[in-house]
Image (cartoon, helix red, strand yellow):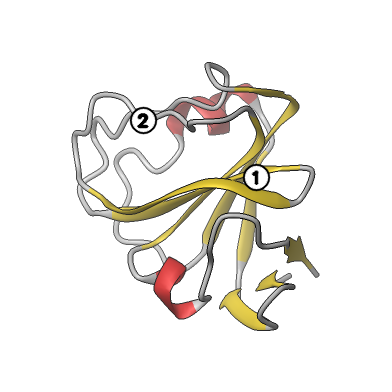
Amino acid sequence: MKLINRTTKKIICEKVVFAKTIFSKLRGLMFREKVDYALVFDFGRASRSSAAIHMFFVFFPIDVVYLRNGTVVDLYKSVMPFTPYLAPKRDADILIELPEGAIEKGKIEIGHKIAII
């Protein structure tokens, strides 16, 4: 599966992994080496608080994209390790954690449509 920016037709990431279980959602990218994939969290409903994350025990910077109904509602570039709290400015139902630089590579902006194909 690939993550693509449908607005710009750019491939954001060639590999997509879903955090499906409670354990995988709690762990996220903690205690991992640098990643070359998009880690996708589906919260099932749009909320700011449910989509909030921390970067404790994530030892490398990442890019973060928040979606609502497939549309980018917020994004953060180069979120630093051990950031204590990060939440979208608007309600989001999907969170995507990406390798640092993926937002630039995929030309992602607020309002763009993102798809997994």
| Circle 2 Cα neighbour tier, 10 Å, few/some/many (<14 / 14–19 / ≥20) | some
Q: Residue 55 location, x and y as percent? A: 29, 34
Tell me what residue is drawn at x 20 percent, y 43 percent: 81
Q: Residue 32 location, x and y as percent? A: 33, 49
Question: In this figure, which residue is indicated by the disc labeled 2?
Answer: 86
Q: Nearer the viewer, residue 92 or 61?
A: 92
97 relative to 86, above or below: below
**Earlier-in-chain disc, 1 versus 2:** 1
Question: In this figure, which residue is indicated by the disc labeled 1?
Answer: 67
14 relative to 76, above or below: below
Name the quadrant containing residue 69.
Answer: top right
Where's the N terminus, which quadrant? bottom right
Q: Is residue 59 left or right of residue 37?
A: left
Name the quadrant containing residue 41.
Answer: top right
42 relative to 3, above or below: above
- Most extreme residue toward the top is 49
Tell me what residue is drawn at x 53 percent, y 67 percent: 108
Q: Residue 89 location, x and y as percent? A: 48, 31
The amino acid type of the residue labelled 2 equals Leu
